[in-house]
Image: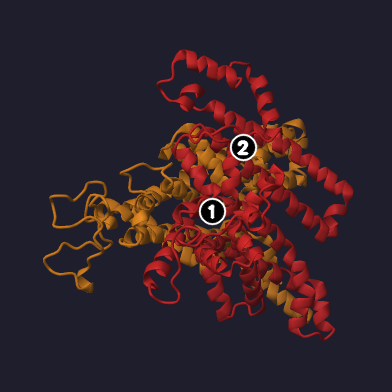
Amino acid sequence: MQTDDLIFEREALPPEESKWRVTIRRLFRNRSSIVGLVILTVLTFIAIFAPLLSPYNPVKPLIGKENVKKREGPCIRLLGCPADKPEHYFGIDGNVRDVFSRVLFGARLSLVIGFTTVVFAVIIGTFLGLVSGFMGGWLDNTIMRVLDVLLAFPSLLLAIAIVTVLGPGLINALLAIGIVSIPTYARVTRASVLLIKELDYVSASTALGASDAYLMLRHILPNSLTPLIVQATLGIATAILDAAALSFLGLGAQHPTPEWGLMVGQEYKNVFNAPHLTFFPGIALMLVVLSFNLLGDGLRDALDPRLAQRLKV
Amino acid sequence: MYQYIARRLLLAVPVLLGILFVTFSMARLLPGDPCRAALGERATAKVCDAFMKRYGLDKPIYIQFGIYLRDVLQGDLGISFRQGRSAVEILAERLPTTIELAFSAMLFATVVGIPLGIISAYWHNSPIDVVTMIWANIGVSMPVFVLGLLLEYTFAILFKDTFLWLPPSGRLSSGVTIPHLTATWKLENSSPALIGVLDFVSRLYIFNSLVTGNWKALGDALRHLLLPALAVGTIPLAIVARMTRSSILDVLGLDYIRTARAKGLNMSSVVFKHALRNALLPVVTIIGLSLGGLLSGAVLTETVFNLPGIGRSLFEAITARDYTVVQAFTLVVAVFYVAINLIVDLLYAFLDPRIRLG
């Protein structure tokens, strides 16, 4: 290659973009993250406008109001539902309620469950990881050994154990799932803190007399966020799955809450004569988990510096 | 190598102690007093005093922990208040079902997942790759219990009266029996320890019917195992396939692969002879780690398919508030999990010299 060409190329380069803009641009180039974002946007829309979108009350039975029977299948006009029957897209559940409305309201709960547990776990986990990685020594050892014990249990099992002690209920289930996922975030944060605290700009700041708290919050934390964001996005998927599993077992959300796991749990014994009661909430669960998994994978690719390097070469 | 093994084993000791502490505190943190939780609300004060004394609950908490440690080390995991039997006995009865389920699910995940990953990596970005990865994404996102129920419905109802029909629940059809190995081999008069072991092994239906040549029962047991194993195995399958794919793709970017290609080797021998050996290292770890998730999946799958395994009985014990059983089962599963992680670590060190020497 000639020298002139090189200079020409360099001049043609656009001005340096901010890291976040690069990330977002890459995110939108990635097929799977687009699919994830689309599903998630639709679900968020449904969650926000559930009261407007759902034709019936998700909790109140329709007994005496309409001519419908318990666990009746879906009835859709376009697919040949007789005109004298009321329309129910997803059918009727065992308590004579409209499943469609319940599934729509379930989106609300599911997203809230995912975000609250992960935010809870991320705050505590990041704090522990930050302190542990920055301080080192006996404090680091103690914190990490305790977290090792938590990691020694399969997550759902530990959550079950915690709920057994706290008593069943949605809040306790969320608390249990939150506690169970703390070690992951603590480890991720600690790993990046260990790398970053050795960097020159941190030493420079120390030499200028910065306090430990300032160093941690101003210099180290913001730069260790990248892996944490990926982990948290994937963590939302796991949290939603675990919460649904606890509700399925009767340890999480309680009747008549329109929670997808609970909806399946209440009706799974009727799967042979009323499969729609398992199918619709089940698919809804799968979609929300899928969207966070796809988004998490896409974010990892977009934020991964190794991949970025490969693209540049 | 021996030094590495010794170090890893020593590191497991504090974790095991921590696990014991957690299961111990579980029983102590329960709301209400343990006596009335065990004997019911109507237990009198006198009965309760005797109960507390008998189980050492009147002693200081650190002595109680010592007693618990001693009991566990002696293989005494307490007595189920609901069933009046020892928790160990219940475990021995229920564990074979779960072992069979976990083993077949893992076998399915590995035998199907690794080739799928290889195919995806070999023809990456081709339609085969895209379709496989879409299914892998759906697979990891599907709740185990929903997948189990959908499989049940598909194979037991939709395929009814066809050759694809599969039984939706239980371990054997009614009428099919698998005799006890002590009876088959006429060992009724041997030592109690041997009978205990045979008792346990007899409940591994696949193994039992295989060694005794009971083909009819074997077929029936396999047909019952197929759907639950598919349900439990799907998530690990998806994880293994994705891991194999990305690991091979990573390795294919390395210099020694370029060298191999430059020597004039064709692509398939580069993939199978050079890349695969190194690419499978992370896959080994991921298979080991999925075993933990598999145990969680077993709780749900055994509930859905009505299988009498430890997951199912753990759930039953929770609903019946049978705390000793919950405690015992949690302990056993956690110890299993630690053991699996340890084995994976050691295997990894064995396969990759950089770890044990580094």
Task: Using a 10 Å C-alpha cutoff, classify the residue at mark 1 as few (fewer than 14 neighbours), some (14 to 19) or many (20 or more).
Answer: many
Q: Are marks 2 and 1 on the same chain?
A: no
* Above/below status of A86 relative to B54: below
Q: Which chain is orange?
A: A
In the picture shown, does residue A247 fall above or below B169? above
For disc 1, the marked residue is B297
Mark 1 residue element: helix
Residue at coordinates 78% horizontally, 46% vertically from top-left? A200
Q: Residue at x 68, y 40 (%)?
A: A148
Q: Give the residue at the far left of this rendering.
A: A84
> Does A128 sit above or below residue B118?
above
Can residue B257 be seen here? The reply is yes
B62 to the left or right of B50: right
* Count of numbered badges drawn on the protein: 2
Measured along the vertical axis of the image, is residue B26 above or below residue A160? above
Q: Nearer the viewer, mark 2 or mark 1?
A: 1
Q: Which chain is red?
A: B
Question: Mark 2 — residue?
Answer: A127
Task: Tell me residue A121's x, y (percent).
Answer: 55, 41
Picture residue at 74% right of the left edge, 73% below the top: B252
Q: Amino acid at mark 1?
A: Gly
Classed neighbour count for the residue bearing mark 2: other residues with Cα under 10 Å, few (<14), some (14–19), many (≥20): some
Q: Which residue is drawn at the image coordinates 61% and 30% (left, top)? A: B24
Q: Disc 2 versus disc 1: distance between alpha carbons?
A: 31 Å
Percent coordinates x, y for residue B190 in the rendering = 71, 47
Q: Quadrant of residue A128?
A: top right
Residue A301 at least partly seen: no
Q: Is residue B220 left or right of residue B10?
A: left
